[in-house]
């Protein structure tokens, strides 16, 4: 990242850009020698008292992924994740209705179609079979490595650093927006992938902006400062890409994202996490 920045930016601007990078945990299929940090698919282990998440009027959600917080290198990240316990991610994937009902950030009535459950350490759990009508995804165990992550130059945080007041979600007159710099950054890592913490790898516009638009009351113009401020309040909790090994395909090779506010994360209010998804 440093080499790339110094090749395309002045030394001073390169340092300012590098200061915006955030450590994220990139997840990938584990080998026998890897430390397992979570899984895609399979079945979740739940306490007897915890009900399987349901979207009222539509049906139960599919189990997508599990993250073992005790196995994560939490201290190497700047996201205030628990040091123990388990995070479970569920999503209404269309198995029950042929994809008729969509879970969309902008549709408040669909928000119950995606859920995060946190199971504290020490609770007795057992594998829970999927409800009738849902076929579990093939199990893929995940390991991970910490990497520095970058975000788009039109992300509010980057825009405010290099071009305060520039239109949200658009290019502006600075080298971080030059196509040569963006192509080099993409060539360095062209995979969206699975990730915990760090900057989200958005497929389209910044997912933080999508979530900010959804939580604000009513349509907000992109030049409204409230939108930029709200987008800056959301952090990536997790993203799960389409994955052939787990037979997961989100739209046209898309990605599922869960974001959370720092205060809710500190309070372990994972029920307040927001969901969105993007595809090409």
Image: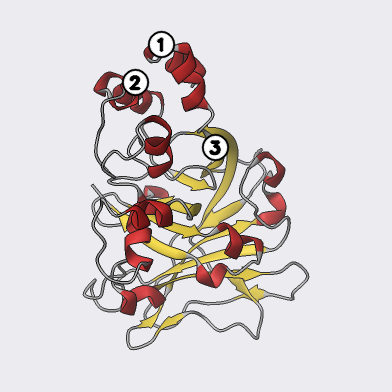
* Residue lying at the far right of the rendered structure: 122
Residue 84 image-quadrant placement = bottom right
Query: Which residue is the site of mark 2?
Result: 184
Q: Residue 155 placed where, x, y %?
A: 37, 42
Which mark's residue is nearer the viewer, 2 or 1? 1
Vertical relation: 210 (above or below) 191 = below
Q: Residue 226 placed where, x, y %?
A: 36, 57
Vertical relation: 5 (above or below) 166 = above
Query: Which residue is the site of mark 1?
Result: 7
Query: Which residue is the site of mark 3?
Result: 22
What residue appears at the point 59 percent right and 44 percent down from the top-left corner?
143
For the residues labelled 2 and 1, say whether their Cβ atoms are less than 8 Å apart.
Answer: yes
Vertical relation: 70 (above or below) 21 = below
Vertical relation: 73 (above or below) 269 = above
Q: Residue 121 placed where, x, y %?
A: 75, 67
In the rendered structure, the answer to whether residue 230 lies left or right of residue 183 reads right
What secondary structure is marked by label 3?
Answer: strand
């Amino acid at each position: 990242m440093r080499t790339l920045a110094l090749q395309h930016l002045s030394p001073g601007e390169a340092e300012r850009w590098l200061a915006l990078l955030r450590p994220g945990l990139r997840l990938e299929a584990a080998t026998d020698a890897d430390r397992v940090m979570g899984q895609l698919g399979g079945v979740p282990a739940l306490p007897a008292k915890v009900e399987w998440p349901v979207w009222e009027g539509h049906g139960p959600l599919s189990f997508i992924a599990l993250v073992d917080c005790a196995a994560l290198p939490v201290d190497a990240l700047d996201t205030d994740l628990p040091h123990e316990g388990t995070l479970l991610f569920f999503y209404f994937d269309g198995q029950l209705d042929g994809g008729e009902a969509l879970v969309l950030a902008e549709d408040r009535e669909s928000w119950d179609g995606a859920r995060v459950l946190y199971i504290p350490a020490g609770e007795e759990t057992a594998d829970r079979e999927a409800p009738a009508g849902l076929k579990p995804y093939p199990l893929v165990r995940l390991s991970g490595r910490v990497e520095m992550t970058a975000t788009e130059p039109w992300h509010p945080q980057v825009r405010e650093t290099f071009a305060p007041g520039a239109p949200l979600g658009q290019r502006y007159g600075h080298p971080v927006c030059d196509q040569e710099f963006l192509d080099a950054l993409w060539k360095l890592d062209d995979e969206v992938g699975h990730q915990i913490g760090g900057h989200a790898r958005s497929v389209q516009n910044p997912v933080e902006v999508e979530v900010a638009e959804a939580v604000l009351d009513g349509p907000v113009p992109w030049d409204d400062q409230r939108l930029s401020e709200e987008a800056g309040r959301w952090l990536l909790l997790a993203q799960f890409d389409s994955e052939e090994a787990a037979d997961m395909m989100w739209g046209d090779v898309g990605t599922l994202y869960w974001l959370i506010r720092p205060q809710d994360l500190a309070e372990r209010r994972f029920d307040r996490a927001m969901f969105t998804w993007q595809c090409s």
